[in-house]
Amino acid sequence: MATFLPLLIVLMIIAALMRDDFSLTLAYLFVGVTVIGTWWERRSLAQVKHERRYNEHAFLDEQVEINLCVHNRGWLPVLWVGLQDSLPVALSASPFFQQVLSLGPGAKVNFNYSVYAKKRGYYPIGPLFISGGDVLGLNKPQRLENKAQHLTVYPKIIPLSSLQIPSRSPQGTLRHTQQIFEDPTRVFSKREYTPGDSLRRVDWKASASSGRLQIKLFEPSIALEALIILDLNTDNYHPKYYFDATELAIVIAASVASWICEKRQTIGMKINGQDPLAVDGVPPYMSPRKGQAQLMRMLETLARIQIGAKVSLIEMIHQQRHHLSWGTTLIVITGKADTTLLDELFQARRAGQNVMLILAGPPFSVEDSSSRAAHFGIPVVAIRDERGLDIWRK
Amino acid sequence: MSEHQDISKQSGLNVNTYRLVSYGLVASMLACAALTVVALVDRIIPTWQPSYLSVLCFIVALDRLYTYRLFRDWMSFSREWLARFGAQVIIILVFTKAMVGLSHGWNAFLTEISLWQQNFSAYFFSGETVFALSMALMAWLLGGNFAALLEEIGPEQVQSAGLDGVPDKNIPARKRLVSLFFSLGTVLVVLTAISRIDLHSVFDRQTFSFIEIPALAAGGASTLLYFMLGLALFSQTQFISLHVRWTVQQIPVNGSLAKQWAVYSVLFLGLVSLLASLAPTSYGIQPLQALAYLLNVILTIYLAIGQVILAFFLYILGLLYSLFGKAPPAQNAPVTPLKPPDLPPSAGSSVGPNWLEIIKVLIFWAIFAGILFFAVRQYLEQHHEILKKLRELPGWKFLAQVWGWLKNLLTRVQSGVAGLVAAGRERILQLTARPGLGGGFMNLRKLDPRQRIYFFYLALIRRGGEKGIPRSLSQTPDEYAAALQAALPTADEDIHTLTQAFVDARYSRQPVQPEQAQRVASAWERIRKALRGKLRKQYKR
């Protein structure tokens, strides 16, 4: 309208002074063009609704198909609408999905594009910018921003076949090499009765059929109520390789958690890193629970977690171990094992918890962590890279 | 591959189509401008009918538009440029002369050609020819200006933009195009107004009244067409600007966008033109006369102030002259007193109010106020510094408060009305969409046989209650049937049939046949008649 203002003034003066109706008609033409054009632009853009459909969670190396449905819900046609959907650079070759089109009344258009889950993380999909303008270009094009959604890419999970987790529990549900504790619910064989065997172990049916007393043999077991403590404090990793080492630590945590859940055991997790969804950035404590839901919760947290600790590892272990029951296995994953950490872990061991220390990444300290840990009676596993996990894949 | 094919492939635009359309629009606009001039000339010299000038201007403009790119590639005053330019000038000259000559007829033209031998310059460059050549020159110059701007906006920007994106030249180019369009348009409006004033002065001596002028007479149609073509050109250049920008940014564009843009532009301009032509421009009370009076008053005041200043200056000058013993220069100059402007004619007081005229006036002033408000608002939105200064004015806060109060009031009224409408709609929906047998309007055919039996039984209970035979909550269907049979012995069998059918439908799982529902419907009709008969007997008592 400002563009037409001088002409409008001239037209009104001519109409007034010369009493000419024609000037008024022209004035109406320009005003109509501006007013109706502006109204059309604003109204039509407000009618455009969109819906983005995709799987909000993905595992590594999956292709996530995104379907963007743009719908003109009103009766006015949309002259032109520009769509610009931001995509995470880490997952997509192009940072945007862009398209310009025209939408008739009630028209609905679908677009399909995809991202590749190449790296774990919590990625924003969007925001989607919708822009449009009027037919004569009298106003600046409008640009509306819509809220972004998110895609969670889980960390890599390496399937493990066995994990030599220490246990002190007299009864449990998993087989263990230390054959002191047996689970009376898991019979794996029978043998003939020898004097001294308890009569409670006699298998009467087998004895009746064979005509000789037979004794049940039970599988040894452990109780795997476990808590994974994952350290993402970069000071505890090699300064040159801290990024890869912390990523390896996350992979180890995910793989161990997955294995334990597969065995239908109780697992919890505590991480000292940064969680973008947490109110104060501190990741929530996941108390030990069983089930697939618990595993997914842990994987979600591991997907989002970023390096940068607010609490020291020692402090965290000290806080957590006091709430754990006797016999719980503490699986600590960090980059280095100094004396203070080993001391804290020894205290935990003395309190009745089983401790296992996993060192992720290239060796940080020249000290021999394994020998010092052995002195404290703490099993240590050093995993330099993903191939190091092969020890548990055999 | 040629240059513009490269551009076409890259931008997805048909460059030739763009040029054809834009050049056609510009040439047509200049032809319309020429027609407006012709209309004015027609008023001044009625015997001269130079309608051919519009065709001349169209062709000259078109030629200039198409040859602009060739001239641009050649250095000015180079051999090629001179040859081409010279040829163009000669062709335009000859073509103009031919058109001027042929406008008087073939024989007259041949006669004129024979006179060239006597005095070539006088007969070749006649007044009419010179005028026509001036018009052609104007068309040529304006065509060149438009061509330059269109080239700046056009698809060739893709090539010159490079990786940095479209240079901002596009924005000033469009602005310059708008300025050129409006400048020429303003001139045309003034010329049209002058032509129409001349027409206003035509007085019919027989009827002693002014002749009513058609809305688009005397250049009105051509000027209006000029503006409409200009708006179409804006739309096209806007599309091109955007398309170039999208191409440089590598944003895919839907292939049908160009076609849909053209369709929507035509529809939009057509609709707006229709609305503009239907909007009120003439009315009884003549508010524009009030505006004219106001303008005249302002002008009179300015002139009065000017007179005062001039008088003071002359007085000082007179004193200076008298110092030197000479008579002041303007001593005896006649002073014309400024007359206040005449009031606009009032509406007839003896006749009662014409409601239609008042409504027209109200519509006009509402539109006028809306235009003014919208224009001021847009202007202030684009000039924030003025808005900032206005906010510092003392009365602004009060005005802002008043405005806020009005807005709140309007919002409350709107929400109240919306709430009422929603409640009313809800009520209607409840009435029309009521499922089952709750009453209200219902289509019995939509009910299944079981539901129809329920409906008739409930109707029996309702009607019985209205006729003084209510059913108590503790009564079973059979007990109520007995009460009804006692009151209506004539409908004994039908009551029994209806009641038994209801019991079977309600309490058994056996399917209900449509024939059963039909029997119940017939029974109900007879019961209803019996109940009506009972009512008549009650009234008779």
Image: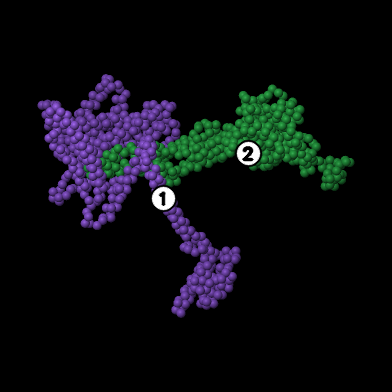
Chain colours: A green, B purple
The answer for which chain carries disc 1 is B
> How far apart, in angstroms, are the residues tagged by discs 1 and 2?
49 Å
Q: Residues within 10 Å of mark 1 (few under 14, many from 20)?
A: few
In-image side of B514 versus B160 (left or right): right
Q: Please, what is the three-letter code of the amino acid marked with disc 1?
A: Leu
For this rendering, which residue is in front, B345 or A360? B345
| Depth order, front residue of A203/A130 | A130
On residue A145, the disc is: none
Residue pictured at 29% horizontal, 28% vertical: B67
- Residue A2 locus on image (x, y percent): 34, 38
Residue B515, how many percent across, how many down? 52, 67
Q: Could you say whether the residue bearing mark 2 is in a helix, strand or loop? A: loop
Judging by the rendered image, the residue that carries numbered circle 1 is B409
User: Which part of the image, by quadrant, shows the C terminus of chain A?
Assistant: top right
Measuring 24% from the left and 41% from the top, which residue is drawn there? B298
- x then y, percent, for residue A219: 78, 39
Residue B191 vs residue B473: left or right? left
Q: Report in which chain the residue with disc 2 lies.
A: A
Left or right of B333? Residue A60 is: right
- Quarter of the image holding residue A261? top right
Instruction: State the mark number for residue A284.
Output: 2
Residue neighbourhood size for the residue with mark 2, other residues' Cα within 10 Å, grouped as few (<14), some (14–19), many (≥20): some
Task: Give amino acid for label 2.
Answer: Pro
Q: Quadrant of the N terminus of chain A?
A: top left
Circle 1 or circle 2, nearest the eye: 1
Q: Residue furthest left?
A: B118
